[in-house]
Image (cartoon, helix red, strand yellow):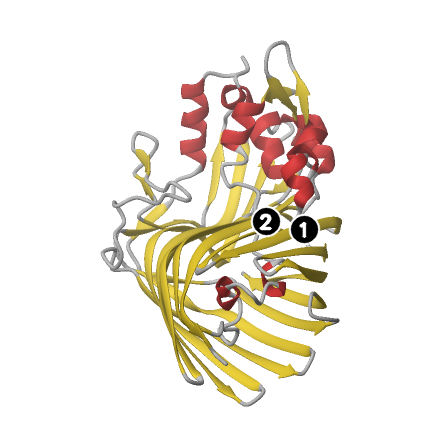
């Protein structure tokens, strides 16, 4: 079976294929933005202003684009049979994170550095079984007489962040922390303990039975009142004036903590980031489906994928009959992905630094780790180049070679970093992508 690549991307990959880990920036101690991954890493200048920055990181642990896309008569198409062959039976994970840094300010007063900044952040998480896309595109006829698992987890979140930071140097040791006030833009998430569902198709009368313990929470995102009224209002990555800071009423708090120890040529750092949560209590809805539903229906996959097995109206009638959630208006909370960075750098000479990194993320009960080696080279007084190599265990990828650079002209500093340069050259062959860039003004004098 085949569907157009455009339809596939719209239906299945609405959540872009990105993840949280960021490998290159911890090796770039010379740029102010490294403070975002460890509040104890600060610069010697007395005043620093970050004008704008952007970050997008990610991974999909399924197939790469070129493994499932083939050229149709006129447009690229997705081979669903090939896609199903690459998916794992239970857990297929998609992660995305997107960040816009607007204005950040740091001021150093002797050994104390204070900072204040604003960012708009989005993250996405989807964990689904192989049977879920199979039913959507290939129908339930292939599972006659079987009970299949359709349970999945989803978390789409957008929020504003205002961070107040402080770092103080005690000789060779610097300790830093950030307090973050959060304002939720929108959220769509399954309850952590209620996201199970199963489907059974009777082999004699083809009766469909849907059983589940499923709770979907939504805030400023999905408004459902039967299939005659289904409205979505959540554009992932949206940066507009529609969602002004602290106007949503969905409040949250988080904090970062970090330490840096400078022992001559050896530089050690450790940080824990985004310990916190957001409470959603404005324009929030809860959709619970905890009963057993039966329907003497049909195989509705054809209508959803453009085939002739059923009309779209009949398919929607079937779905509505199978899914009759109870709607409530209770507040709920979501946690941020918690991250840990442990980093060591060693100065070989005036130009070269080498080091290693351990990264760990814990989100919705799942832990993802990465391990990296990196080096930086001060090619010119105004130019620093770097490279990294990382192993990411969430999709068993071993081809993550990254590049980074920073350019400083007088008081203007520009930098860019990617953890997988191959994704820029051959995006259809890569499961990972990571990039960050930014501009900062390094004002006033340096610390002697």
Badge 2 element: strand
- Let me know if residue 97 appears in the view: no
Q: Is residue 33 left or right of residue 50?
A: right
Q: Residue 434: give its label.
A: 2
Judging depth in this view, the residue of 229 and 16 nearest the camera is 16
Badge 1 element: strand
Contact check, label 2 and label 1, Cβ < 8 Å: yes
* Mark 2 vs mark 1, CA separation in Å: 9 Å
Judging depth in this view, the residue of 123 and 331 nearest the camera is 123
Picture layout, residue 208 above or below residue 104: above
Indicate the quadrant containing the N terminus: top left, top right, bottom left or bottom right: top right
Residue drawn at the location 69% of the way across and 70% of the way down:
350
- Let me know if residue 134 appears in the view: yes
Residue drawn at the location 58% of the way across and 79% of the way down:
260
Residue drawn at the location 68% of the way across and 67% of the way down:
358
Judging depth in this view, the residue of 246 and 291 nearest the camera is 246
Residue 296 locus on image (x, y percent): 50, 27
The residue indicated by pointer 1 is 402
Judging depth in this view, the residue of 270 and 425 nearest the camera is 425
């Amino acid at each position: 079976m085949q569907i157009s690549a455009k339809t596939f991307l719209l239906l299945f990959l609405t959540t872009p294929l990105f993840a949280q880990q960021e490998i290159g920036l911890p090796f770039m101690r010379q740029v102010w933005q490294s403070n975002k991954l460890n509040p104890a890493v600060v610069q010697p200048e007395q005043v620093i202003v970050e004008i704008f920055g952007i970050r997008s990181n990610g991974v999909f642990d399924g197939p790469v684009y070129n493994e499932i896309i083939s050229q149709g008569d006129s447009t690229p198409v997705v081979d669903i049979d090939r896609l199903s062959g690459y998916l794992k039976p239970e857990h297929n994970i998609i992660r995305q994170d997107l960040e816009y840094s607007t204005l950040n300010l740091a001021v150093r007063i002797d050994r104390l550095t204070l900072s204040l900044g604003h960012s708009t952040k989005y993250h996405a998480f989807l964990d689904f079984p192989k049977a879920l896309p199979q039913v959507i595109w290939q129908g339930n006829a292939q599972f006659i007489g079987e009970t299949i698992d359709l349970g999945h987890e989803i978390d789409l979140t957008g929020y504003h962040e205002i961070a107040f930071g402080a770092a103080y140097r005690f000789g060779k040791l610097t300790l830093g922390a950030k307090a973050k006030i959060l304002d939720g833009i929108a959220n769509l998430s399954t309850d952590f303990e209620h996201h199970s569902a199963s489907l059974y198709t009777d082999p004699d009368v083809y009766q469909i039975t849907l059983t589940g313990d499923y709770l979907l929470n939504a805030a400023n995102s999905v408004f459902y009142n039967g299939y005659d009224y289904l409205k979505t209002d959540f554009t992932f990555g949206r940066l507009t004036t529609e969602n002004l800071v602290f106007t949503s009423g969905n409040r949250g708090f988080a904090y970062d903590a970090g330490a840096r120890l400078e022992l001559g040529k050896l530089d050690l750092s450790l940080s824990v980031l985004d310990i916190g949560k957001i409470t959603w209590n404005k324009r929030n809805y809860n959709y619970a489906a905890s009963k057993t539903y039966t329907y003497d229906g049909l195989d509705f996959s054809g209508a959803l994928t453009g085939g002739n097995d059923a009309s779209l109206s009949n398919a929607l009638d079937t779905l509505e009959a199978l899914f009759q959630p109870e709607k409530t208006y209770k507040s709920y909370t979501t946690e941020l992905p918690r991250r840990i960075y442990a980093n060591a750098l060693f100065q070989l000479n005036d130009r070269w630094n080498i080091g290693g990194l351990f990264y760990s993320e814990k989100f919705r009960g799942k832990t993802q780790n990465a391990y990296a080696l990196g080096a930086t080279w001060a090619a010119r007084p105004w130019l620093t180049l770097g490279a990294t190599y990382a192993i990411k265990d969430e999709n068993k990828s071993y081809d993550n070679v990254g590049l980074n650079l920073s350019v400083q002209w007088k008081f203007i500093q520009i930098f860019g970093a990617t953890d997988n340069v191959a994704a820029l050259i051959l995006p259809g062959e890569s499961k990972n992508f990571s990039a960050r860039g930014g501009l900062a003004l390094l004002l006033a004098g340096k610390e002697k």
